Image (cartoon, grey):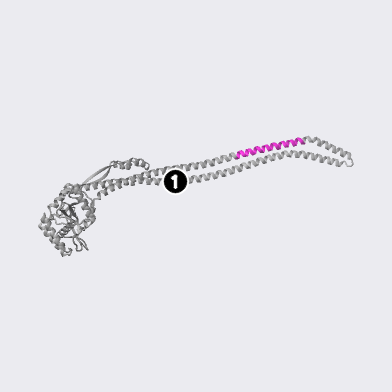
Amino acid sequence: MVRQLALKFLYNKTSSGLEPEPYHTSLAMGFAAAESAGTGRSIKSVSFVSIPYWVVQVSESESILLFASGDSTRSLEATENTALSTATKILSTETPEARDIPHAVEKALPMIGNVEKTVSYVKNLIDPAVIVSMGKHVVELEPATFPNRLELSIDSQETLAISEEFQSLVAGARTRISKMDELLEIVKEQLKGKLGALGTVTSSESDRWIRRLRMQEDIEELETRELAEKKRDAQYDLHGKYKLELRALTAEFARSVGDLEAFFAQLIAMIQDSRTDIAQKGDDVEAAIRKFQELVGKLREQLPEYERSVESITAKADSTMKRVLEIDNEMSDKSKELSRSIDSQIRERRHRLVEFRMEKDQAELELESLREKVENSVTKVMSEIEKRSRTLQEELNQILYFTLDNNSINNLAPLTMLDIETFAVMYGDGDTKIFTSGIIPEDRFTLPVRHRPVASNFDEYILTAVDGLKKSSVSFRNAFEHASSDQNLLRSGDAADQFRAGLNDLMSRQLLGEGVKERLEGKWTEYAESV
């Protein structure tokens, strides 16, 4: 069943809000406003014309607003992923290991960004914001009420069909978002999970390499220390052997000098014996001298032997010094060879440690490079999915922009006809003017009186919409002119009575200035007689 609501033409501002004025008062104020706006022109017709809107639910909490007269379309754009299922399959089945992720992402990324644009057209869908702003002033009409409504271009059945079409657009947009959310969840659970596991492996491997490096450093330090000690011990032994060899040479040379000592000991013994013999000659000086001369002769005989001994010892000294030089060279060569050997071993161990560090750095670099590559791929695909999700959400928001909260307009039903009541006037020169919902003056007024709209933005919206539809839609223009002329209240005696009742009401409320009632009555009669 269709519920009828209306935004009335005239309201009274009270402490509790705006209250709708009765028909007769609205008619009197509408005519006063029309006469005032005419600036001396005659009036050919006045009428209340209701501009109809359908308000139809699209969910438990939301509805859409359709213009019920005239023909228009609202285009709603959307984009559809053409290969999303393939991208989802690639990311979910082709990434068994973290190292597989970059290649899979490279394949899937173009598919995520590959979309086709679609445009849907919804008949007579309008932005509800301005009319919703007046929602709390809407009143419910009695079922038997028949406003002077513009001819409908869409009936209730077509309205329900449009609602289903709109719901289908919303469902499609939500489905696209849901699919993208599912893909994002796969990335978070699988790809990001593998990235996290790779990070754990990287950290664990780094710790393992650090432990191994420390062990190698300890081993290298111990072996180097042992080799250094071995080098010192070997050098000490070599130096000791050198000393022994020098001592042996010295001892051997000393023995050579001992032969000279024995030679001189023999001479000394000879001299001692001669001295004893000479001493025993007593007063035989000549015998003593002969004995001395014999001694001298013997000594002279020993001179060649002496020279031979000295020459032999000198030669021995030369050969000994030569041997000393040989031993020095041998000692130096052996010491150098020993140092080279041990230093080479130390360098070899240090080189092994350097190579181990390089191996560790290379392994960590490869793992970190893989982790960064995987992380960049995961970040890139998540960014692309989130970007696409934002686009899809924007598309959904663009659709939902045309929905209104069911509580924003009083007494909405699943299917509601909302009439926007206006007061239409045609002047004698053929010019037309409409007045939207207004507020009755709070103080006594005289003519001309300015019509005071309930809301200036609503007034501008309705006037602009009507003017635009008159220009763009022949059916709307004809419907409006038909509603205005067929229901010309100047031709109705009952309307005249209602008009006078409205003036009396305004008079009783002390809102009419002096002579206003009489002037308006006269003008009504004048215009009524001319039509």
Label 1: which residue? 208
Asked whether, in this view, residue 89 is left or right of residue 282, the answer is left
Asked whether, in this view, residue 377 is left or right of residue 302, the answer is left
Quick one: quadrant of the C terminus?
Answer: bottom left
Residue 169 x, y percent position in the rendering: 23, 46
Indicate whether 434 appears above or below 299: below
**What residue lies at 10% left-to-right and 58% top-to-bottom?**
494
- Tell me which segment is drawn in magenta: 306-335
Q: Residues within 10 Å of mark 1 (few under 14, many from 20)?
A: few
Residue 515 x, y percent position in the rendering: 15, 63
Residue 321 lies in the magenta-colored region: yes
**What residue lies at 52% left-to-right and 42% top-to-bottom?**
350
Indicate whether 159 appears above or below 329: below
**What residue lies at 13% left-to-right and 58% top-to-bottom?**
524
Q: Is residue 516 visible?
A: yes
Report helix, strand or loop for mark 1: helix
Residue extending furthest toward the front: 40
Say what amino acid the circle numbered 1 marks.
Answer: Arg
